[in-house]
Image: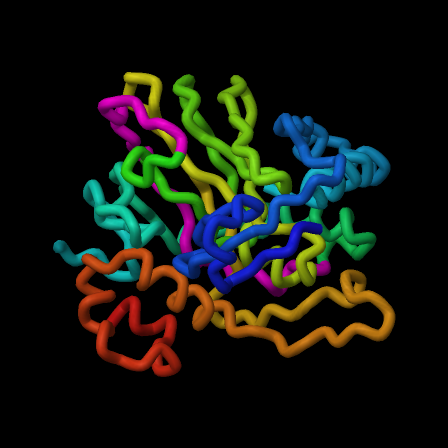
Amino acid sequence: MSETLTEPPPAGDDEDVFFHSGTTPTYRKVTKTPGAFTTIPTIDISALTSPTPSLSSRQQIAAQIYSACSMTAHVHKNPAIRGFEPMFETRLDPRTRGDTKEAFTMGDCPLEPEQGYISKIFALAFGLEETAFAGLFSRFLIWGMRARLHYPPLTPPPTEGDAEGISLGAHSDFSWLTLVLQDSVAALEILNKDGVWIDAPPAPGTFVCNVGQYLERQTAGRFVATVHRVRNKTGAGRYSLPFFLTPGPGARLGVLECCVEEGEERGEAVDVGGLYIRRVLPARPKHLTSIKYRDVPEKEWRYECLYG
């Protein structure tokens, strides 16, 4: 696993890659060992919704998912940071004026009892019962879906190293798992453990799946949150539809016992809602909720602040 640092590297050190985990400046060591991915794996999950799915077929899919996730990667009012998000409102990289995108976000999407395909298949991937994560996700998801995330073309086309030539700054998601439906415009890039940005080109009938920060924490880093960015240098507008699968705000997230090596400590469980607000408010400095709590100590932030 590549090491992730939060302190700046020595000046002139070209063996580190800078990105933002949430809004925390992070430097990932570039490794020279073989094994870094150079393409994005594709997994067929159609068997999950088969009328007569077999346990063996689900276990095969779970094994593929486990293998893929184990690769080191990679002014208006809208309560709960929902609704319309104008251009430059989010700023995942404080060195820039803001992200060149606009979005409309929905949340608290109700789940039907028979749903839960994703949590069940991940439970199988860890060798657990399919219902192991049933209590982690509430009936109403914390975040939900962004309806058509729009990235206009960057002009002039960006060059590598141009901080302002980024549609969406490098980051990992505030989610457990993110599913992204892309259009035909290629602009999404994934960071591998060698510090190389790998294209994630659109493929009909597929979703891009990003491991989120909650799943990384739950697996003690066995599954590393996917660092990604968007650079729309195509000359055409890009649209995507991301779905953020996130535990309920009242959930406590601990490390899975199967992910702890002998002699290691599991550590304390974290409050999902509290961790979420500490990530989302700094990323939206122009939002009214962020402005309201700017002078409030971070330790006093609660998930309920998003509705205050």
Q: Is residue 45 above or below residue 281?
A: above
Q: Is residue 247 above or below residue 152?
A: below
The residue sitting at 69% across, 36% down in the picture is 36
Q: Is residue 44 above or below residue 105?
A: above
Magenta stretch: dominant secondary structure: loop
Relative image position of residue 101 (x, y in whole percent): 27, 37
Give the residues drawn in magenta, as a range: 132-160
Question: Which corner quadrant of the image does residue 303 belong to?
Answer: bottom left
The residue sitting at 31% across, 81% down in the picture is 297
- Of 118 and 222, nearer the camera is 222
Q: Is residue 253 left or right of residue 105?
A: right
Relative image position of residue 158 (x, y in whole percent): 32, 27
Q: Is residue 181 left or right of residue 150?
A: right
- Residue extending farthest to the left is 75
- Of 187 and 109, nearer the camera is 187
Q: Is residue 84 visible?
A: no
Q: Is residue 217 visible?
A: yes
